[in-house]
Amino acid sequence: MRTVSCVVVIMLLCASVPASAGNKDFSATFDRCGEFVGIGYVPAERARSLVPSQYTLAVVDTNAQLVVRVASCAEVSVDGKKSGPARTAQIGVMLEGPDGSANINNYLLWFVTDSGKLHGKLQAAGIQNGNDQQLQFAFESIGGTGTLSVDVSAPRFPAFPLFGNVTNAPADPPISFVASWFADGKHGALRMQTRFEQLRFGKTDIVLTPSPDTELATLIGSPSLSFEVLNSYNEWQTATMQATLQ
């Protein structure tokens, strides 16, 4: 009887453990933010070598489209818990699909943040990312125009600065927008889908100058990238990201 009782107790204890105990999914909310987003052309064959074959590149002629995004937020919450201000930088390649609910799909090549909580959540989900406590994002404007300076540097990740003029700060009516970023890691494919309910676009002439002898410099194949497809400074009040293992 003692043996049977012990088995019953163990089964009850196991049943009481939430099924999501090993879940790597997480959410994040980004409040009162400004961001730079640039999209420019890079040789498709170079991008193809960095993106897993199951993803289809959005190719124009012989070029893939490189997406560079750097954001600075006054408040970031991770899984509902406030963690203070934070900055994020991510670089990826635009995809055809696979998320039909998104306005844009990208495959993530590099992600860097100064948020310890975001860094830890991505690591736990199996996605390598950089933690740069000196990540710089400085926007200085007068009357809607000004300059934007960004400097991203993290160990084992390509370092890159961004600099240029903000020629028209966000002034158009806000729009809703959904962006999905995919990354393959040791636990499978992670989809990071961010919903912006009121995203406002502005115009810039930012240029990226990658550090020499890095994977990013090799991908671009030139000393700088000038973002021919989109060169924009954006602002929003609240956006929510859901990170889900597929």
Image: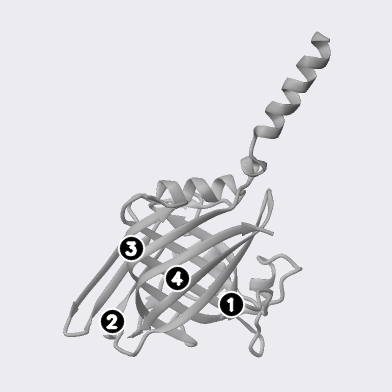
Determine the residue positioned at 33% across, 68% down. Answer: 33
Task: Tell me which numbered mark, 4 or 2, is placed earlier along the sequence.
Answer: 4
Local crowd size for mark 1, using a 10 Å CA cut-off: few (<14), some (14–19), many (≥20): some
Disc 1 marks which residue? 102
Which residue is label 3 attached to? 73
Q: Position of residue 232 (x, y in %)?
A: 39, 82
The residue indicated by pointer 2 is 165
Q: Amino acid at mark 4?
A: Arg
Q: Residues within 10 Å of mark 3 (few under 14, many from 20)?
A: many
Q: Quadrant of the C terminus?
A: bottom right
The dot on residue 69 is 4
| Residue 217 or residue 70, whichever sits in front | 70
Left or right: 118 in relation to 49: left
Q: Amino acid at mark 2?
A: Asn
Q: Which amino acid does the dot numbered 3 rest on?
A: Cys
Q: Nearer the viewer, mark 2 or mark 1?
A: 1
Q: Secondary structure at mark 3?
A: strand
- 2 and 3 marks in contact (CB < 8 Å): no
The vertical placement of 162 against 27, above or below, is: below
Q: Are marks 4 and 1 in contact (CB under 8 Å)?
A: no
Q: Residues within 10 Å of mark 4 (few under 14, many from 20)?
A: some
Q: Nearer the viewer, mark 4 or mark 3?
A: 3
Sequence-first tag of 2 and 3:
3
Residue 230 position within the rendered picture, expressed as x and y whole percent measured from the top left: 46, 85
User: Which SS class for mark 4?
Assistant: strand
Q: Is residue 23 left or right of residue 153?
A: right
215 vs 195, nearest the viewer:
195
237 to 84, vertically: above or below: below
The mark nearer the N terminus, 3 or 1, is 3
